Image: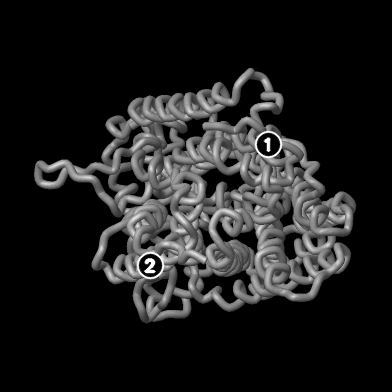
Amino acid sequence: MDQPEDDKERVPLFGNWNYWYVLVIGFLVFCIAVFYYLTKHFS
Amino acid sequence: MSAIDWIVLALTLTLIIAYGLYKGRASKDLDGYFLSNRQVPWYMVLLGIMGTQASAVTFLSAPGQAYTDGMRFVQYYFGLPLAMVVVCISFVPVFHRLRVYTAYEFLEQRFDLKTRTLTSFLFLLQRGLSTGISISAPSIILSSLLGWDLFWTTVVMGGLLIIYTVTGGAKAVAYTQQLQMIIIFGGLSIAGYIVIHRLPKGIGWSEILHMGGRAGKMNIITTGFTDKGGHCRFDWNDKYNLLSGIIGGFFLALSYFGTDQSQVGRYITAPSVSESRLGLLMNGLVKIPMQFLILMLGVMVFAFYGFNKEPLFFNQSQLKLLEHSKYADSLATLSARYDAVEAQRIVAVRSPDSAGWPYAIVDPALIDSRLQSITREKAQYKATVRRWLDDKAVGGDSNDTNYIFLRFVTDYLPKGLVGLLIAVIFLAAWGSISATLNSLASCTICDFHRRFSTRTLTGRQEYRLSQLYTLLWGIFCVAVAQLVYGLGNSLIEAVNVLGSLFYGVILGVFLVAFYRRRVPGTPVFVAALITETGVIVLNVLEKKGMVSLSFLWFNLIGAVGVVVLSELLRPLLRPQKQ
């Protein structure tokens, strides 16, 4: 992905937007895992 | 409602209008009116996109959905975080770089005028109609439950917000959405606290979750696969499961956040790509937990009714309909029996001498046979009422899902809080509708009026015209709401289906624009027309029972259809050399 223009902008918290994308997708996987546990545990 | 509730409701709604008018002062040109001069910070972008997505139906329907069908509805949002990432990577930088007013403006630069006009028209068509339905659905529920006049409920639901939306444009929408979301979350948190507070002593989170689990409400993750005669098959008609949530939900969210002007219009108001991205990514982080908690409210209400008298039917107006039908006498007898059975059940479940109480409620193996037979009898009475309502001679609505939460609110919340929760419903509707009106007006003026008019207007004239279009769209949506109310609860489903009919195709056009750079305008335009026709035909076949397919899949079919067809048509429809 080439976005030279917006790469110049400051990325909050992390140095790279890719870390943000990994965080969002990782959180989704975490949510699914927790929900799966709750489903199994309480059904 | 009590006088205190009326005062709380009136004060809350007045506060929002006054706040919108106060904060909505912006420069009197298109940049100020539709883009807030691109000065909206990321956290307001976040609250804006959340407030636009969460309509009144979200807060009315979701707890009821968990109460009846379980929490699996949360899977509908699993594709959203993935879509946020794609929107941030591909869509946001382009919209900012081109400094567009509408998402469709980009399509003219990438393809041609006719493709821009077609997609903008599809957006106006589906958004104009679905906003009318979005106004109508909560109005029907409130008027049925509280006995309010439907005409005036609809006018307040869809009309009062016009005051600040017309006056202040995108800036008023952004600021009011911020305050609305705070009041909404505050109101729902208080409601959740009261449910817990009113449960019997000894019943806490663990018992609530176990009760929900035993009753099948904790079905948060479902695969969609069913075992039919020893063969494991995927149910394509199953609306909410892991696969349809991730794949169908992804395409729906990508289309909604990437190509729907009501959302694009929120995040292009940020001053930079970074601020837009941060708002969208935060939405990807908070949306699923938020939806989970709203659904959990439904499970909590379910646990509450495990220890308290559950209404025979949550929508009281439908029982009144039966009282004036051939079932009037039967209903009177059945209601008396139901009340007696419920009284027995409550005594049994609340009795401290029940074996292992409160765990008798948690574990059915501990419940004595008497309580089991009472529960079965109760279920039969409820099923009988639904059957009567389904009778064509009665013409009732046997689905009371959307009435469950509000019925709990009106029956059990203290004075003042009922008014606040009713205000929450209005504010949720206003946040969503005001953003939509703003986007409908921006498309009308930028994609049609300004593009096709031969007369050049000054910035001030365009601003005035934008206000006029916002007003006209507001009147149109309220008029649609007044016309469609005879459809009953199917309205809510209609909003989702209507969106899915068009979203996939619009997304397909944008996907080709971003990722298939060799494809010119005409093949995309023709592919969009063919695919849109195909999706509509598919929907008709589905309604007739000839095809078994959940509406979420229309998004995928529409998007993939446009991408594939435009590639196939590319060699046939080459642009003529000048």
Q: Which residue is mark 1?
A: B273
Q: Is residue B27 left or right of residue B417?
A: right
Looking at this view, is B572 or B79 the one in front? Answer: B572
Which residue reaches farthest left? B230
Q: Secondary structure at mark 1?
A: helix
| Percent position of residue A18, x then y | 55, 24
Which of the labelled discs sits on residue B530, or is there none?
2
Q: Is residue B360 above or below residue B178?
A: above
Element at label 2: helix
In percent of width and height, residue B286 lies at 58, 34
Q: Is residue B181 visible?
A: yes
Image mark 2: chain: B
Question: Residue at position x 42%, y 30% from top?
Answer: A32
- Chain of the residue under the numbered disc 1 shown in the image: B
- Report whether residue B145 is seen: no
Q: Is residue B459 left or right of residue B445?
A: right
User: Which residue is at 35% across, 28% downward?
Assistant: B355
Model colouring: one colour
Q: Is residue B371 left or right of residue B318?
A: left
